[in-house]
Structure formats: C-alpha cells, structure tokens
Amino acid sequence: MMIDKRLIGAVVGSKKYIAGNVIFQWISLLANIAMMTGITRFLGALFNGDGQTAQTTAVIVLIAILVRFVCTNGASRMSFLSSKAVKRTLRERIYQKLLRLGASYNEQVKTSEVVQVAVEGMDQLETYFGAYLPQFFYAMLAPLTLFVYLCFVNVPSAIVLLVCVPLIPVAIATVQTWAKKLLSKYWGQYTALGDTFLENLQGLVTLKIYQADDFKQQEMNEEAEKFRRITMKVLTMQLNSITIMDFIAYGGAALGIIMATTQYAAGHVGLSGCLLIILLSADFFLPMRQLGSYFHVAMNGMAASDKIFHLLDLPETEQKTAACPEDTSIVCKNLSFSYEPEREVLHGINMEFPKGSFVSVVGESGCGKSTVASILMGRNRDYLGSVTVGGVELRNLNEASLMENITYISHQSYLFKGTVRDNLLMGCPGADDGKLWDVLEQVNLAGFLKSEAGLDTKLTEQGGNLSGGQRQRLALARALLHDSPVYIFDEATSNIDVESENDIMREIHALAKRKTVILISHRLMNVVDSDRIYVMESGNIAEQGAHEELLKNGGRYAELWQAQQSLENYGKDGATR
C-alpha cells in the first residue's frame, strides 16, 4: 500500500536510512515494553503484598527512558539523512535531465512545472521518505512484536488486539482510490495556477502597456478559485479519513481494555498482566494511526512523483555531434515558427547574418524579433524552414558547440548570487584578476567596484543590489570574456539609464568591428551604423537595407524613425529658445 517501487529504486541511498529509522523505533518499543512490564509487576507485587523494592523498578524505568531518548534522536537523524538523500538524488536527476533536453526543454515542459516539482514536490517526497516509509514498516512490525509478547500474558486479549489493527489500513485503502484521483487533480490545478502566475508576473510590464492587466487578473482569479475548491475537497477528504481512523484506533484500544478486565475477572490473568495489557493496548494502534496521519502527505508525494517521473521520462532528442564550423555565417531561409499550432509567429522569413557583419533587427513589440534570437540560440528547435550556421543546419549542431560560438545578452541577463568574480568567471573560467579588471574597465564598471569590495563584491540573487545599468554592464563584461565569434544583443539596453546605455552601445559598436553582432533593438538610434537592418512587422520582413537606404525608401522604417525622433526631440526646441 502506497509503496512505489520505482520511486524507492530511484533513491537507493535512502534505504539504509529508512531501515535505521525502523530499527530505532523498534528498539524504543522494546524499551517501552520493558518499562511497562517493570511498572505493572511492581504494582502487582504491591497489591499482593510482595516485597519487591521500588529501586529495581526505578532503574528499569530510567534505563528505558534513556534508551527511548537515544532512539528518538536516532530515528530523527535517520529521517533527516533519508530526506537529504532524496532531495540530492532527485534534484540532481532533474538537473541532468534538463541538461540533456537542452535549451529547448521548455518546448516539452513548462518552467513553472519544473520549479514546482523540484521545490514543492520535493518537499512532499521528503516527508514520504523521511516519515511515511519508515512508519509504514514500523507499523507492520510493532503490532506483531506486541502480539508475540502479550501471548505470554493472555492469548485471547492479544488476538483481539491484533485482529482490530488491520481495520485502520482497510480504512486507508478505502479512501486511497478516491484520494489518488483527487490529489492528481490538485497537483494539476496547482501547476496550472503556478504557470499562470509566473506568466503574468514575467509579462506584467507588457500587460500594463497594452492595458490587458484586468483581463489577466480575471484569468488569475478564476485559476485561484479552481485551486481553492480543489484544496477544500482535499481538506474535507483528509478530515473525514482522520476521523474514521481515530474511531478505529481508540475503539480498538477500548476493546483491548475490556478484554483485559474481562480476562482478569475470569481469573485468566493476574492484576499485573491485566494492567500490562491495558497500558500496551494503545501501542497496538498508535503506529498504524500515525501511519494514517502521514497517508495524505504520502498521497501528495505520490502525486508529485508522477509529475517528476513525467519530466524524467520526456523523450530526449538524439545527441547531435556536429560542431559549429569556423565560418559562423548564419542564413535563415523560409523560416516559420509557432508557439501554438493555431498561432504562427514567424511567416517564412529570410535573413542573412554574414560572418563579421553588424546586422540589426528592429520592429515594434510582438513582431517576432526575440523569437528569431531564441531560434538562433537553439531554444526553439521546432521551426519550419532552414537555419544554417556555416552551411550546417542548426538542428544538427551540438548544443555545447552552439553555446560556445554564440553569446546571447538580453535585457534580463541573469546574475547569480555570489561575488562579481564568480559571475565573471562563468564567461571565462581561466581568466586571471588582471583580465577581469580589464573587461570591467571596458564597460566602465571598474571604478564603482573598486569603491566597494572589488572582485569580491557580493551580489544578491539576480544582482538585486545593483542598479539596472550596473547589472547590464556586468552582464556585458561577462559576455566579452566569453569571446565567441557571434554575439546576439536582444534589447540589451532596455530600461537602463542613459549613461549605461551609451557605455554598452559603445562596446557593441567596438565589438562589431571584429565579431558578428546581431542587435535586436526597439531604439533605432542604436542601429544607424549597422551593415544591414531587417525591419520586422507581424512576423514578416517588411523591408531591409542600410539606414540611409531605408530612410530614402520612406517605408515602415522611415515611419518608425520619424516617430522616435519626434519623441526624443520633444521639448528640446522650446528649451533652447
């Protein structure tokens, strides 16, 4: 019951800790039996007027209490080690699976689901391995141990108590079928709610701009209400099943007490034996009752494990062996892409990014610029048409080689918690401090860091203790250290101060003289010096050419240029008068 062989087999290292937990609990039970036997024999001796001293009983009680204390701590330690093994093993397997799936993993599984199973789901499995499984085996062992011992005291009472114990797992099994379906729905709704929340949070600025936040708020409220309802059903199920198990457990213990007094009245057992049966009656049922209290957590763990194994069982594409050729020219022919079958984002576009060129992609938000960048980075491989790097189809390139040859910098480049040095060394692990300082000078960040703790300046998660401009300059410094043939800048200067934008654009233009640079930008002033500019509109290439050529054509680019110039120069004439 509630034993998943595959799940246990996935964390082989936890078996010894589960066994150790059970052994500690069993030794604690034996100590309790010895203590209760000593107390009841002392009381029986007092009743019969025998001369047994209290000192012997006190020694037995003290030793039993000490043993139980040690066993309780030992069991807790085993529980901790088992939980630790589960988290370490399964999270490592999830991480390795994501590495094998590659940058395009989100085409098969949502990031929010990965986060939830790796965090919330793992917490549920922590209890499953650390509490439920040890309790399961102990709940089988404890009643049998007590039955064997009490058979030497009074067989009928021992039999009655043992027969009543299985009624608890029967009650659990009755609830299990319904509970499994309910908890599967619970986890499905939980991940759906998390996905909606994460999507809305990440796109909050865009939602505000397009005034779609009210619609998304209503959608979020509907998902939250569905989750509330399923949660209430789960809690109702848990409360009802706990009530049933309590009734059986306490009813069984009461029946054992009745049997003990009846046997004593009939003269089949002495006073000490009667008291011993009464005191140990509850121990028949408490382990199984405790197992019942872990039942719902275990069900949650099983539902979470289904999600985990769904992730681990995702099909993996054949590992590509082709490396990026020395010629890193990129050509897109008749490129189409859809995030959803009914919504095509790119409509058969053609683009060329020759080696050593400076090419920009511009257009309004939602036109497909970032989707192109995502495809070039191998994050979306389910495209139609052809994308080649040096004549080799991008789908056939080894992902490690692709990442080595193409560096991507977005407006939300991730900075990890740690030091500035730690983050920079991700771009070039073998770089010495001198090289790190050189690149920091390039991005105009060295002065600030020297006023702090230098390369040992601490960063919070995502560089939260830096300004937006400082974060982007540090991300650019890391990218420069990577020193790849191709660089993709995806709105790298969005939402930062003017000084930081100027510093970053200066370095991008310098980089374009010796590398292939693909610049995706909403601000046309930044793309003026490009060798070629692609103007995208609704997933199509509206026009292409150099800056002056596009202005002369008077097309979409010229319209965007005039609109932006009007906004940027607004009020300047009045200020100079």
Image: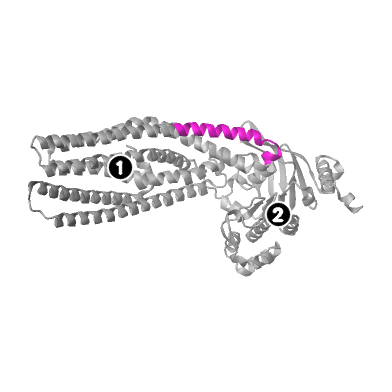
577 and 340: which is toward the camera: 577
Task: Please name the amino acid that badge 2 sits on.
Answer: Thr
Residue drawn at x 27%, y 33% is 248
Q: Is residue 484 visible?
A: no
Q: Is residue 535 left or right of residue 474?
A: right
Measuring from the top left, give residue 493's x and y in whole percent: 71, 52
Splitting the image into 4 quarters, where does residue 505 fall?
A: bottom right
Task: Please name the amino acid that badge 1 sits on.
Answer: Phe
- Asked which colour scheme the image uses, the reply is one colour
Q: Which residues are magenta?
A: 206-232
Mark-to-mark CA distance, 1 and 2: 62 Å
**Location of mark 1 (residue):** 136
Splitting the image into 4 quarters, where does residue 282 fall?
A: top left
Query: What kind of element bears circle 1?
Result: helix
Residue 224 sits inside the magenta stretch: yes
**Location of mark 2 (residue):** 516
Residue drawn at x 58%, y 46% is 396
Residue 257 sits inside the magenta stretch: no
Measuring from the top left, give residue 341's x and y in whole percent: 61, 32
Q: Is residue 102 above or below residue 196?
A: below
Q: Is residue 359 left or right of residue 288?
A: right
Mark nearer the N terminus (1 vs 2): 1
Measuring from the top left, give residue 440's x and y in whole percent: 67, 64
Query: What kind of element bears circle 2?
Result: strand
